[in-house]
Image (cartoon, rainbow, N blue to C red):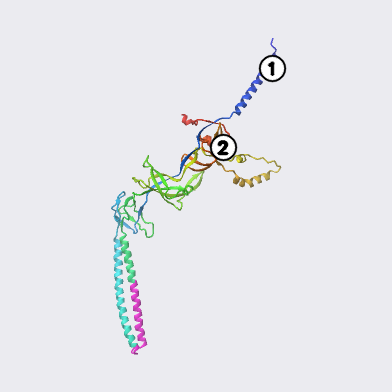
Amino acid sequence: MANPKKGRKLIIFTVIGLGLVALTLAAVFRKREVLITVQTEKAARRSLTELVVANGKIQPVVQVVISPEVAGEITALPVKEGDHVKKGDLLLQIKPDNYEASRNSAEANYKSALAGETVAQAELDKAAAEFNRNQELFRNKLVSDSVMLDFKTIFDVAKLRYTNSVHQANQAKYGLDKAKDDLSKTTIQSPMDGTVTRLRSQLGERVLGTSFNMGTEIMTIADLEAMEARVDIGEIDVVLIKPGQRARLEVDAFKNRKFTGTVTEIANSSRSATSINQSSQTQEATKFEVKIRILEKENFRPGMSVSTEIETRYTTNVLTVPIAAITTRLPKTNALAATGTNTVTTTNAAPITDLNSAKSDKKSKDMPKPSEVVFVVEGDHAKQVPVKIGISDNDYWEITDGVQEGQEIISGGYKAVNRELEDGKKIRKGMPEKSEEEKK
C-alpha cells in the first residue's frame, strides 16, 4: 500500500517545479527583444537640385485696365470680350453732348476775352498818346500839375486793364483747352495691340470718371502672346529666389505637359497675409509674389491655375542619403535629463514650489533641441549617428558631415525611423508591414 505522505510530497514538488519553469520561460520571453523591420539604402554620391514649390495663377505680362476719365453714358461699344484689337481702334464712345456744350461755351468765353484784350489795347494806346502829348505841354508849362496827374492816372489804369485782359484771355484759353480735352476723352481708343480679356460694362450704362475717384473699370486688354505665372512664396523660401532662375511649370488645364520658365521679378514687400486657423487660433502666413515668364507659346487663359518648381541651388557629386532616412532625436547626453524627474527631500515644501516656478522659464530656454540624425546598420543593430545636412531635392538630402560613402543607412519604414528606432535597437531587413486597409 502506497504511502500517502510521499504522494502529497510528489505533487507539491511537481507544482513547484512547473511554477519555476513557467517563471523562467516568462523571464526569457520578457528579455527577448522585438526586432524592428527596416529597409536600407547605401549612402552614395549624386547631383542635387533644390526646388521651391509654389502655386499661383497665369496672367499676361502686360495688361491694361480701361477706365474712363470722364463720366457719362456709353453710346458706342463696338468690341466684345475675346475680340482682338489693335492700337488706336475705337473701344467705346461716351455721350459727348454735355462736353460739346462745355467746349462751345469755353470757346465763346475765349473769343470774348480776346475781344476784351483788343479793346484794352486800344484804350492803352489812346491813353499813352494823350499822356505823351500832355507831358510835352507840361514841360513847356502849358498845363497844370493836376491836369498832368489826371492823364498819368488814366495811362496807368489803361496799362493795368490791358494786363488784366491778357490774363483773362489766357485763362479763357486754358478753359477752352480743358473743355476740348474732356471732349476728346469721351472717345476711348485701344492703347495697345491685344485681346479684350474682360468686359464689365454694356452699351447704355453710365460710367464714372477717374478725376476724383477710382472710376468704372469698363474692360481689360491684355497681350496674350506673352504670359507669366504669378506665384506666392513664403518668407523662408523667398530669400533663395533670384531673377534668372529656371522653373518648371504644370498647368492644370494642360495635363501631362510641363512648361519651362524664368524668374523675372520678385516682390519687395509682402502681399496681404493669409489667415490660417490652427487650434482655434489665427496665424498669418506672409507671402511674396514672384513672377515667372513662361517660355513656351500655348493657348493660356488669364487666371489658369499653375504649380511651379523653381530651381534655387544645384550641387554635383555630393554625398546623399534618402530623404526619409533623416529624422530628429534629442542629444544622448541630454535625453534623460529632458525626460527624467529629480526628487528633492526637504522639510519645507514651499521653497521647492518657488524654486520650480522660478526656474521654469530658464528650463524652457535650456531645453535641449532635437538634432538631425540617421541610423546606420551595424550587424543586426541600428547605430544613431548625428549628421549635418545641406540642400535637398524631392528624394535625397545632401550630407556634409557624419556619414561615409557606402555606409548602409536605414531609410524606412516611416514609423521605424521616426518613432521606434533608438541607438542599439535590434533590426531585421524586410518589406514594410501592410496596414489593415492594404491587407483588405
**Residue position for label 1:** 9
Q: Amino acid at mark 2?
A: Gln
* Crowd band around label 2 with a 10 angstrom C-alpha radius: few (<14), some (14–19), many (20+): some
Residue 129 sits in which quadrant?
bottom left
Give the number of the disc on residue 219: none
**Residue position for label 2:** 384
* Residue 384 within the segment the image draws in magenta: no
Tell me which residue sits at (36%, 84%) in the image. 149
Q: Which residues are magenta?
A: 139-167
Question: x%, y% of residue 432?
Answer: 50, 31
Residue 343 drawn above or below residue 152: above
Give the main secondary structure of the magenta stretch. helix
Residue 213 sits in which quadrant?
bottom left
Tell me which residue sits at (63%, 46%) in the image. 359
Q: Residue furthest bottom?
A: 141
Residue 116 drawn above or below residue 15: below
Question: x%, y% of residue 395?
Answer: 47, 39
Q: Nearer the viewer, residue 329 or 100?
A: 329
Q: Is residue 337 left or right of residue 156?
A: right
Question: x%, y% of residue 399?
Answer: 51, 41
The tag earlier along the polypeptide, 1 or 2, is: 1
Q: Nearer the viewer, residue 331 or 108?
A: 331
